[in-house]
Amino acid sequence: MRRGKMGIGAVKWKQDQKKAYEEVGAQLTQNHLTHVQEQLQVFKTNLQTFAVKYKSQIKKDPEFRKRFQVMCAKIGVDPLASQKGFWSELLDMGDFYYELAVQIIEV
């Protein structure tokens, strides 16, 4: 009565199966990573469009600005990162840190 595959052939077969599973797993991981990166880029583009559309509200309304900042922070975008950065130019903020400090002091 035969109990199953034994010997070098069985070991080789198991190694081949393991390698095949690892390759499929790596491909799935890469596909997922690519998809997530694409979705994040679409979201960032939409966030930029949103920021331009509502820049006056972002500058004037503290609650709206706070929610915008929280939303940005959740995806790793920092609109306050640099005075001369992309977001500063996009939102036409100039010295945003100075304006923000004044608004914080007022509160």
Image (tube, rainbow, N blue to C red):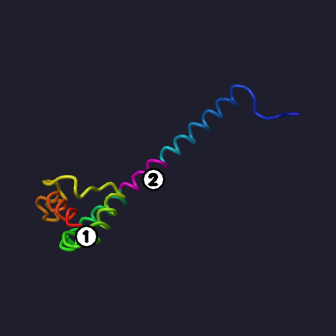
Residue 8 against residue 53 in the figure, above or below: above
Q: Residue at x 47, y 48 (%)?
A: 29
Compare marks 2 and 1 and give the one earlier in the sequence: 2
Magenta span contains residue 36: yes
**Left or right of 44, for residue 82:** left
Query: The N terminus lies in which quarter of the figure?
Result: top right
Residue at image mark 2: 32
**Left or right of 52, for residue 35:** right
Secondary structure at badge 1 equals helix
Q: Residue at x 36, y 58 (%)?
A: 74
The furthest residue to the top: 8
Where is residue 80 shown, x and y percent of the image?
22, 56
Where is residue 9 shown, x and y percent of the image?
69, 29
Q: Residue at x 33, y 62 (%)?
A: 70
Residue 62: name its quadrant.
bottom left
Residue 63 against residue 26 in the figure, above or below: below
Query: The C terminus lies in which quarter of the figure?
Result: bottom left
Category of crowding for the residue at label 2, using alpha-carbon neighbours closer than 10 angstroms: few (below 14), some (14–19), many (at least 20): few
The furthest residue to the right: 1
Residue 62 - label? 1
Magenta span dominant secondary structure: helix
In-front residue for pair 94/14: 94
Q: Label 2 sits on what residue type?
A: His
* Numbered disc total: 2
**Magenta part of the chain:** 28-37
Secondary structure at badge 2 equals helix
